[in-house]
Every structure is written in C-alpha cells, then in structure tokens.
Image: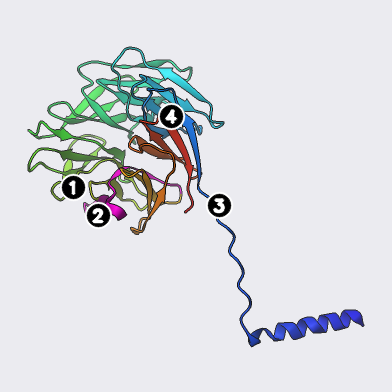
Amino acid sequence: MARLMFLLAGVLLAGCTSLGPAPPVPSPTPAPNTVTAIKLPDGSFPRSPFVAPDGSVWCSETSGEALGRIDQNGAVTHVRIPGNNNSPAGIVHGPDGLIWFAGFQMIGRVSATGTVTGWRSADVGLPNAIAAGQDNAVWYTNEKLPPAISRITASGAIQHRTLQTTDPLIKLPGLTAGPDQALWFTVTSNARGATHAVGRMPVDGSSYRLFPLPAESGPGTIVAGSDDALWFTTGRGIGRMSTTGDFTEHPVPGDARPLDIATGPDGSLWFTTDQSRIGRITTSGRITMHDTTGAKSLTGGLAVSPDGTLWITDGPGNTVWRYSPMR
C-alpha cells in the first residue's frame, strides 16, 4: 500500500509541471585554459613548431643552431646542426619518414638516430618556407634572385621553378600543399607598388599562376583548410582563397595583426597575433580571441596536435607554450 501511494504521488507531481517553469539547471563550470611552459636553454630563440606523426613536437632553435624535440612526457632533447649561421626555420615530415628543415642556404634532415645531414651549396639558394608535396618530394620557397619555388628529392636532386619578377625585395613567406595536388604560396614585398598575391604551382612545375591581392595586404603563412580552400594571414586579417582564386578577408578584432596560422582537428583554424593573443576562426568566418598569460611574444610560430593542443614558440622567452584552450 505504501508503494502504491508513493507511485501515485509521483504521477500527481509529474502532472503538475505545467503550474510553473522548472528551476534552472546550473551549467557545469568550464575548465580553465591550460597553459604549460616548456623552457628551453637561454639564447635558443625557438620558432617554427611542428608536430611529428609520433606525437613529438619539434622546433627550430634559431640562435642555438639546433632543433629541439619535446616528447609526449615533456622531456626536451636537442639536435645540434653542424657548422654556424644555420638559422634553422621551418620543419616538415619528409617523404622518407625523416624530419626535414630549412636553414640559411641549406636544407637539412635528421635521421632516426639524430644525425643531421643535408645540402648546403649555392644551388640550394635561400630557403624560407618549406612543405612536403604530394609527389614524394620536399618543396621550399627560394628567395634568391630571381626567386623560385624549389623542389628537392630524398636523394638531394634540386630543381627550381623560377618566378618572373624584377622586384629585389620580394618575399615568399608561406608554402603549403593544397587540396588540389598543387603547391600554394604567398608573395609579398616592401617595394612601392609591388605585387601581393597567392600563387599556385602544380607539382610537375610546368607553370604557375598568381592571384593578386589588394595592395599592401602583406600575406604571410598559408595552410590548407578543411573546406578545400587556402587560408593565410594578412597584415589586416585572415584571408581565404578558393582553388579557383576567389578571395575573402576576415578582419581580426582589436586591430591585432595575425602572424602564423594552422588548421585544427575540428576543422577550424588557429592563429597567433602581434598582441600575444591567440585567435580561432571557423570556416564560416567566425573569430574568437583567447588571452595567453606569461608569454613574452608569440611571433615564433604555431602548430596544432591531433588532440587540439596548441604549441606556440616564444622566441624572446626561450619557451614553448603548450596551450589547451577552451573553445
């Protein structure tokens, strides 16, 4: 009988919910942003982070003449580059399964045992940005005169696809493998009336095409987005270009200047700015900004792990920041 009365009371209470709204259910308190500083030796000035397939994070130690490697437990090791004035920069995973990097008048790679080999000659030129192509080769932008988009194989064979320009101040700061089996790159210059553009070159190197951008747009790093378009930083915001050359630009709030950009595992893109803030932009163009604490400068570069963790190099602080932001 007591059980029957209990069930009847439950039915009556259920029927009385129309008498007024249910009390609000409190939302769970969001977890705070997680920021971890991984210190490198003084004077290393890290830049160009890269997440390797094994989950380790590499960065170039520009002043330290080395590459740093952070394993999944946060332990740091250093791979010394032979010689001096190497100025290591961009890092990629090559078609031979090794780590490749660009430096001053050199292209190098690191063996599985940590030995650095490479190519350092006049034929290498002046590498800047570097990317792995879909043709089992490594490509890099070459700021020699005249500038070129260059290709190097695992055996060291180098070919240059020269760009037609007489601008001595031309820069080629960005390069990526596109969604259309081609290499995409950015072109900028400080010369008056210079061309600012996004370029496309098929992997056979037979031709190239430049898609002009607004004057003084200053394109920088470039990546392939999850929407089969190319995304890149400009002096004023984040640019998007379709593979047919349609261009749109999204201004960044607060007059922040974007510096580096990377694609996240959720399809959005993340970027650093000159205000030591991190930005996230969806492929629909919605931007949110995230403050960071403790970083001196975020000008060194940005990489994103498959789990959504951001790795940001802080050159002046000799630090790599591991950042797990709230969305």
- Disc on the earlier residue, 2 or 4: 4
- The residue mark sitting in front, 3 or 4, is 3
- Disc on the earlier residue, 1 or 2: 1
- The residue mark sitting in front, 3 or 1, is 3
Contact between marks 2 and 4 (CB within 8 A): the answer is no
Contact between marks 1 and 2 (CB within 8 A): the answer is yes
Q: Which residue is mark 3?
A: 31
The residues bearing labels 2 and 4 have C-alpha atoms spaced at a distance of 31 Å
The residues bearing labels 2 and 3 have C-alpha atoms spaced at a distance of 32 Å
For this orientation, the residue located farthest to the top is 83
Q: Secondary structure at mark 1?
A: loop
Residue at image coords 32%, 33%: 131
- Disc on the earlier residue, 1 or 4: 4
Residue at image coords 35%, 22%: 154
- Disc on the earlier residue, 3 or 1: 3
For this orientation, the residue located farthest to the right is 1
Mark 4 residue type:
Trp
Q: Which residue is mark 2?
A: 249
| Image position of 262 (left or right of 193) | right
Could one spot residue 309 in this view of the protein? Answer: no
Q: Which residue is mark 1?
A: 217
Contact between marks 2 and 3 (CB within 8 A): the answer is no
The residues bearing labels 1 and 4 have C-alpha atoms spaced at a distance of 30 Å
| Image position of 307 (left or right of 14) | left
Mark 3 residue type:
Ala
Magenta-drawn segment:
237-265
Label 2, residues with CA under 10 Å away: few <14, some 14-19, many ≥20: some
Q: Which residue is mark 4?
A: 58
Where residue 267 appears, as percent x and y from the top left, is 42, 51
